[in-house]
Image (cartoon, rainbow, N blue to C red):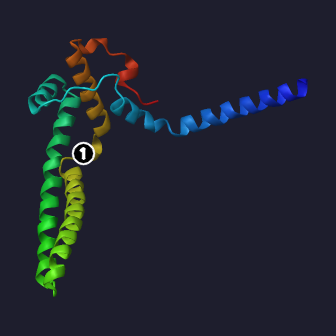
Amino acid sequence: MEESSNSVGFLGRHFEEVKEHWRKNFAFLDYYKKTLVWEKPLPKWIDADVDEFIASDPVYGTQLKAVRESRKYAATGALLGAVHLGGISFKYSKSPHAAAAGVILAAGFGAVCGGVFGAEVAEHVKQLYKLDKQAANLRFLYWWEEKTKGETLFHLSPQRLFFFP
């Protein structure tokens, strides 16, 4: 009888070790848990709230401002790519009944490619590669959570400010 209890103990320990191993391997998913799984959903914010955060936080505020300004590059690139490839598809389409589908598909593909290219241009023009964009966004979410609860930022624990191991 003792042999079966030892084997169950061994299997139980082995299972816990394997579970801990995979928990460490997928630790990067904790970021998504912290931002997507709230006890109570956060209320929506407006641009004035983001501007208030930018003015109040000298480090992450400037980073968040640069990240928000970089969206214009991606949107412009998506628009230019959609118009360009959609126009080329329309110009060279031979069949009138297939022109609409071809233009829509080409414009969609152009928008995706242009958006990615615009985001890459923004990375270099705004020098976003030097910033921790994820930390700036997370810091804003924590700031917004504390503001909507009516608490001050000084009640944040160090684990919430620096969640990376």
Residue 132 seen anywhere in this rendered image of the structure: no
- Give coordinates of residue 80: x percent, y percent: 12, 64
Q: Nearer the viewer, residue 47 or 102?
A: 102
* 97 in relation to 79, above or below: below
* 70 in relation to 54, above or below: below
Q: Is residue 27 left or right of residue 91?
A: right
Circle 1 is placed at which residue position? 128
What residue lies at 28% left-to-right and 46% top-to-bottom?
129
Residue, far left? 48
Mark 1 neighbour density, 10 Å: few (under 14) some (14–19) many (20 or more)? some
- Give coordinates of residue 96: x percent, y percent: 13, 83
Q: Judging from the image, what secondary structure is the residue with disc 1 in?
A: helix
Residue, far bottom? 94
Residue type at mark 1 is Leu
What residue lies at 72% left-to-right and 34% top-to-bottom?
14
Residue 83 seen anywhere in this rendered image of the structure: yes
Quadrant (top left, top right, bottom left, bottom right) of the N terminus: top right
What residue lies at 20% left-to-right and 67% top-to-bottom?
110
Q: Is residue 159 left or right of residue 140?
A: right
- Res 60 quadrant in image: top left
Residue, far front? 97
Q: Is residue 55 left or right of residue 3?
A: left
